[in-house]
Image (tube, rainbow, N blue to C red):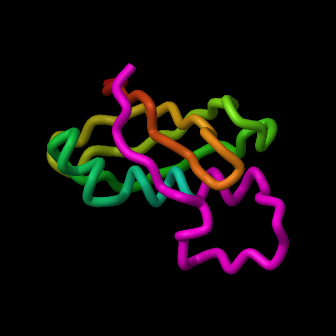
Amino acid sequence: MRKLLAVGVTAIALFSLTSCSRSSTDFAKAAEKAIGGADAARVIGQEFTGIYCEDPGSTSEGVTFSCAGQGKTDGKRYKFTATITSSSRVEITDYKAVE
């Protein structure tokens, strides 16, 4: 698998977390932000639109969940794998074009 990039959940400006625990939605939103960010565009060679991540079944370290998005340049749909690597971090660990 290719490790693309990582985003700390607490660094997401969109979420002002008021408790110590992170919800599955927080991790999904952080992964969406990572896929839509400059690092993913640089590594894969294009930006993505229509990005969506499923909520992970748990917020435990090691849990993986799926995301999808469409390449702006090639128009293909992409599937991404995100992995929770700590209580405040999610990494995009793999991707592939599905069309």
User: Which quarter of the image is occupied by the C terminus?
Assistant: top left
73 to the left or right of 99: left
48 to the left or right of 53: left
In the rendered image of this protein, does residue 19 appear above or below residue 43?
below
Q: Which residue is found at the position 77% from the left and 38% from the top?
A: 60
What percent of the width, then of the height, locates residue 75? Answer: 23, 42
In the rendered image of this protein, does residue 56 appear above or below residue 6?
above
Q: Which residue is found at the position 35% from the left and 56% from the top?
A: 49
49 to the left or right of 10: left
What percent of the width, then of the height, locates residue 74? Answer: 17, 40
Toward which corner of the image does residue 34 lie, by quadrant? bottom left
Q: Which residue is found at the position 81% from the left and 39% from the top?
A: 58
Q: Which residue is found at the position 71% from the left and 45% from the top?
A: 55
38 to the left or right of 18: left
Which of the pair 61/78 is nearer the observer? 61
Toward which corner of the image does residue 10 lie, by quadrant? bottom right
